[in-house]
Amino acid sequence: MLVASASEISGFVPYDGAAVAKAVIEHLEPLAQRVRDAGVECETVVRPGLPADQILTFLRERETDRVIMGAHSLGTIGRLLVGSAAEAVLRNARTPVFIVGPEVGDASYCNFSVRTILCGISFFKTSAMLAGFAAELAAEHNARLVLQHVIRPQERAEVLAGRTVDQIEDELVSLIPAELRGRIAVEPIVVPGEPTEELLYQSRAQQADLIVLGAQSATAFAAIARQGVTYKVLAHAHCPVMSLPQLTLVHSGAKVEKAHSAEVYLAGVF
């Protein structure tokens, strides 16, 4: 099922709600028909109100497995619009959120398929759940899974004091559920550096079709949305990004730790 929320279509002045809804449905119908032509059942839903509020309300009313959203840059400076609907949904959804950012080229995804998945891991309590989710996606799509852990420069001495890079790579692989290890190809990567830069570099070097990330709490997310890892990855990733919001992890039984800094790199990133 595809749900399109289009309460902000330029050219429509919301004086007559019924007329606006009809006009928006007509605007979306060609897109919906393309989905139906591809063999997917599609329903167009138009509701008055703030997009984020209506999307979250819809998620509470209907059984939904994924949310798919677009995010765009503002002008030539390339700032990502995560401040409204996308950010609110990322904070509060209880289901994975799939975001197509401004750097994702239309042409390359006309026949979208997932062959390589990049998943960022930071060894928090939610990491095993995130890795398991990415592994299930890889098995479903018969894709290769790359697990990446980035060691910040200021943490390198502490992290490598009692273990080697090879041992950390083995720990990454151990996060994959045993029943999936023989079904998918898993490549662990441990590198020093800045998390955003390394994630974006590996996404291109590995020719990733999808990046899987975990999300922090609302307060931490708000603090870093435009300057931290989340903002930068969504703004510059060449492929879609799937995020597991904190509420998704908590709803699945994970214990989520509190962040101690303004910018964090959690079970996945943010």
Image (cartoon, rainbow, N blue to C red):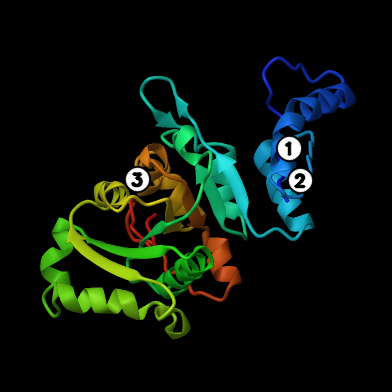
Residue 155 in picture, x, y percent from top left: 17, 63
Residue 2 vs 7, above or below: the answer is: below
Residue ID for mark 1: 32
Instruction: Find the distance from the CA under tag 2 to the CA under tag 1.
Output: 6 Å
Residue 156 left/right relative to 212:
left
* Amino acid at pointer 2: Cys
Label 1 environment density (alpha carbons within 10 Å; few <14, some 14–19, many ≥20): many
Label located before the other in sequence (2 or 1): 1
Outermost residue toward the bottom? 178
Residue 11 left/right relative to 20:
left
Depth check, front residue: 150 or 255: 150
Residue at image location 30% in from the left, 53% down from the top:
206
Residue at image location 53% in from the left, 38% down from the top:
110
Residue at image location 35% in from the left, 48% down from the top:
229
Residue 260 in picture, x, y percent from top left: 34, 61
Question: Do labels 2 and 1 touch, CB within 8 Å?
Answer: yes
SS for tag 1? helix
Question: Do labels 1 and 3 touch, CB within 8 Å?
Answer: no
Residue 225 left/right relative to 157:
right
Residue ID for mark 2: 42
